[in-house]
Structure formats: C-alpha cells, structure tokens
Amino acid sequence: MISNIRNSIIEILKQTKESGELAETNKLNDEVFELLGMMQDEKKFHCIDRVQRITLAKKAIQLGANLSEIVELLTWKDFEGFVASILIENNYECVESFRRRGNSLIKGMEIDVIGLKGNTIIAIDAKMWSIRTGKTSALKTAAEKQKERTQELKTELDSLSNRIQIPKEGEYQLIPVIVTWLVEDVELHEGVPVVPIFKLNSFILDIDQYEDLIVTYTSHYHIPSN
C-alpha cells in the first residue's frame, strides 16, 4: 500500500509539473489527497499549487522515494520552496526571492531564500543544476557570486525587515550558502558551504561546527524610527 501511494504521488508530480493541473484522477489519487488534507472538487479536477506540490514531494520522500527522482519532478520555484520549508521546520523565519532593484548607482540583486533565527541570517542560492560537467568551476563561480550578494545584504536589512520580522536591534551574522542536489557531501568553495538538499537539515542543525570554516559577514541592525 505504501509503495502504491508513493507511486501515485510521483505520478501526480509528473502530471502537474508544467501546468499544475491534474485533469484525470483515480481512487488512489483521491486517497492521497485525503491523506494530505487536500480539497477536491465535484468534477474530480485538481489544480495543485506549489505548496501542495512541496507537501507531496516531502511525503513521497518519507515513503522511501529516491530524492533525486523527486527533485527532478520539481520546478525551480518548487525547489526554492522545498529549501525554505526545511528552514521553517528548523524554526527559521523565511522569505523567498528577496530582490533589490538596480539603478544608475547600484546594481540589482536577488537572493533565493533567506532564513533568520536568533542573530543568524542564512542567505541561500538554490541551484537546481541539471548537469554535472564542470561542477567544480561552476560551484566556485556560484560561491563567489553568493558572497557578493550576502555582502550586499548587509546594507539591506531595513528592506529585509519589510518582508520578515527582525525582532531586535543588534549584531547579525550573515552566512552565504548554496544548496543543490548534485553534490554528494557538504563542500566548501571560497568559504561558502555547498550543501546537498538531502543534507540541508543536518547542516542547519550542526551549523556551529562549520563556524571556523565558513565565511560570515557582520551587520548591525537598527529598528527604523517612525
């Protein structure tokens, strides 16, 4: 029964990857939706949103599905949401797609996922790469760019506070991180941790162990006066 539910979830993810729509369903699909508390309409037509797709993906992994197979069924935005969901499960406040518009004085930037807990801010670049060739060179370049983005984030905490609650004034440590599913273990490039998605949870739990190895940036936040 478990394998049937797992396979049904995989099929749902396949069908809904492009449009989010599942036009045809069956009794097993209905059981999956009921299991996950998903509402269904009278016509048995399902529109699966991103949050539901992430829920389905995590459930499939819990039921023994291969992580790489599941990740390949996710979109770029699904993957970012999957990363954010792991941070949230570890009591981080999260924001996705934090952007700064560029102008003649400053260049624009975007950070895929930002997590805040205590005085630690994790700035994540979610890399859903589809090729392995040139991995080392690509990761080095990505690490350098993520360091630049995180340095820029130091000056954007006021803007960040509009998207996520920064609870108190004081000093914050900003950590650039890359999350991907192509590496097998946690690697360091330019002092930036490159973490496989299946080890992100353990990395977050043990982040203090990397303190002397990873690059961090310090920023002081002051609550804007009204």
Image (tube, helix red, strand yellow):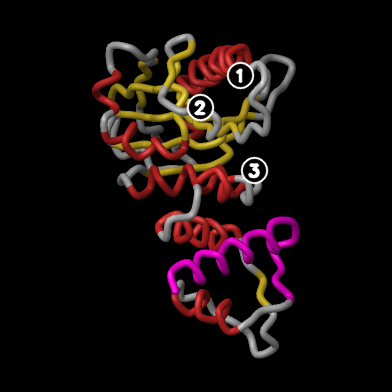
| First in sequence: mark 2 vs mark 1 | 1
Q: Mark 2 and mark 1 in contact? Answer it, CB < 8 Å.
A: yes
Quick one: label 2, few (<14), some, or many (20+) residues within 10 Å? some
Q: CA distance from mark 2 to mark 1?
A: 9 Å
Q: Would you say the magenta stretch is mainly helix, strand or loop? A: helix
Q: Amino acid at mark 1?
A: Lys
Q: Amino acid at mark 2?
A: Val
Please state the horizontal and vertical placement of residue 157, each as a whole percent of the image.
45, 28
User: At numbered mark 3, what does the secondary structure look like: helix, strand or loop?
Assistant: helix
Q: Which mark is residue 76?
A: 3
The residue at which mark 1 appears reads as 135
Q: Which mark is residue 73?
A: none
Range of residues picked out in magenta:
1-23
Q: Is residue 100 left or right of residue 89?
A: right
Please state the horizontal and vertical placement of residue 131, each as a whole percent of the image.
67, 28
Q: Is residue 209 left or right of residue 96?
A: left
Residue drawn where x is 37% and y is 15% of the image: 216
Residue drawn where x is 74% and y is 56% of the image: 18
Q: Which mark is residue 183?
A: 2
Q: CA distance from mark 3 to mark 1?
A: 19 Å
Q: Amino acid at mark 3?
A: Trp
| First in sequence: mark 3 vs mark 1 | 3
